[in-house]
Amino acid sequence: MTEIAELVSIAFAAAIVSNPVLTWFLGICPFLGVSRRLDTAFGMGAAVTFVVTVAATLTFLVQRWVLAPAGLEVLQYVAFILVIAATVQLVELWIRRFQPDLHEAFGAFLPLITSNCMILGTCLLIWLRGHDTLPRAVVYAAASGVGFTLALVLMAGLREELEEADVPGPFQGAPITLIVAGILALAFMGFAGMGRA
Amino acid sequence: MSGTPKEPAPEGSAPILPEPSALDAATSPHLAVGTAGIGTAMRDVLVGLAPAAVMAVVLFGGRAAVHLAVAVAAAVATEALACRLRRRPTTVGDGSAALTGLLLALSLPVSLSPGATALGAVVAVGLGKAVFGGLGQNPFNPAMVGRAFLAACFPVAMTTWVEPAGLDGWSGATPLVAGDGGPVATAWQLLGGRVPGSLGETSGIALVAGGAFVLFRRAGDWRPTAGMLGAIAGIAALEAFIRGSAARGVVAHLGSGGALLGAFFIVTDPVTSPLARSGRWVFGALVGGIVMAIRLGGSYPEGVMYAVLLANAVVPLIDRLTAPRPLGGPMAPPSIVPAAALAVAPPGPPAETAP
């Protein structure tokens, strides 16, 4: 029971309190690039959530069973990048062959996700924050993906609204998006101290 | 509470857009606002805030008056400058910038430097409103943007509360900090305002009286207010039920911190709250829920500012979910994610080109 409570606390902290985008500033590229429309933002978020969960599981196993026993923790970054890139490609092949509908939905996003720093960041943060059992690592990764999706969807809703706004010329496009992102990040400061940081 | 509905209003709003056309006319919400448009509504809210402003000066002394004057002056000056930069007719006359400055000042502690107050007002009107295109276009409440900016810049000064006995007072914890072991302020102290806190948030009776005037004049909608206070009261009652005497209690939660100021003057802002009536209930309850989550679970003693900004960010989604269905119109179920979202391939390279 306490373990379940712990997992809930980890999930809440990963998705809301330490939102990967709005408190860690990870995955800013898709946050700004794919947040123009609500449906694509949601699709991107779902694809990232899926990939980060798979990638975190694999990198956890690689760290636990390969790098740590061999004393090669120094290769963590290289190994994780390799694993993530290979995972994304394999996942895409597999989905294209066996899940054509899912591939239709995720297709364009999967190659982009290879270079999403939020994936690598989450895989590394699992170790930095001491989530050292597999269930905790998987829950942390999945909840980070949900937090990423939340940030993208909030941003997309605001940007769709801003298309109607009479934004002054110099602030149109990227500047106003960054200002909104900054205000969102200020707002997320309010969650500080909740859950298992 | 510095704004106007999202659609340009019919009368009195001419300065906002260079060429108002017949198509700019908005519907019912404005017809209920007296006989005129934005100016009247803003004046009503300013009048509604007057008791709180007077109590701020009575309780905290002349320094409070300095804060109020500095904030209003800086906000109005920023608005005038923004209009000048865009080569548009000035919109200072509609009173919304003055209102933003007043609300900001009332939400600040008296011991803050007046320079910081001015900076907050400039950020509130500049980054909170002008960059989005001015009145009616901003997604976030400008006064709360300015306050969040100050809270991030001056975290210590923004949480140093002074007992309201003029400047001869002593610094002390707000009832929300000190009250972790039970209520420390009586209901009468909360009503009268003789508790530490921000300038305009301590005197419950002034806020309720002014707020009632605003709601009676329909310068603000009562639904977000009811939703927010209802959520706070409900969660506080639940807390009291679970924790017994260790809880602060419903009255203390409603009367302390920024709850009343936020409920009557901030969540009622028609610009940054949802369009539909049902959405406004949701919005108010969301603010109240986040306030209680931050008070009970977070590391800040109070969370009205954060709750308002977070709920502002959700407003576009609430609007989508609560869009009223025209009588006899189609029965399309509202959804944040259209059913087609996952079925339609997103724009990008076709599947065949993927490696």
Image (cartoon, grey):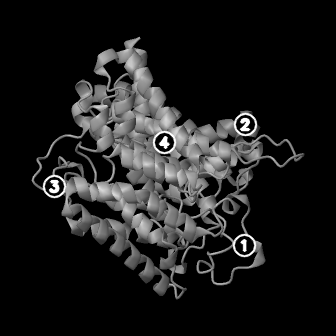
Residue farthest top in this picture: A1
Q: Residues within 10 Å of mark 4 (few under 14, many from 20)?
A: many
Q: Does A168 sit above or below residue B27?
A: below
Q: Position of residue B223 (x, y in %)?
A: 59, 44
Q: Nearer the viewer, mark 2 or mark 3?
A: 3
Residue occupying image coordinates x 50% and y 48%: B212
Q: Residues within 10 Å of mark 2 (few under 14, many from 20)?
A: few
Nearest to the observer: residue A170 or residue B260: B260
What chain letter is assigned to the residue under label 2? A
- Sequence-wise, which precedes: disc 4 or disc 3? 3
Report the amino acid beneath label 1: Asp
Q: Position of residue B52 (x, y in %)?
A: 36, 54
Q: CA distance from mark 2 to mark 4?
A: 46 Å
Q: Is residue A21 visible?
A: no
Residue occupying image coordinates x 62% and y 60%: A161
Check residue A97 in the rendering and tell me which mark sits there, or answer none.
Answer: 2
Is residue B300 rendered to the left or right of residue A142? left
Q: Does B139 sit above or below residue B341?
A: below
* Badge 2 and badge 1 in a common chain: no
Q: Position of residue A167 (x, y in %)?
A: 56, 73
What chain letter is assigned to the residue under label 1? B
Report the amino acid beneath label 2: Arg
* Badge 4 and badge 3 in a common chain: yes
* Badge 1 and badge 4 in a common chain: yes
Is residue B42 rendered to the left or right of residue A24? right
* Badge 3 and badge 1 in a common chain: yes
Which residue position is annotated with label 3? B166
Which residue position is annotated with label 1? B24
Q: CA distance from mark 4 to mark 3?
A: 32 Å
Residue occupying image coordinates x 75% and y 47%: B324
Check residue B287 in the rendering and tell me which mark sits there, or answer none.
Answer: 4
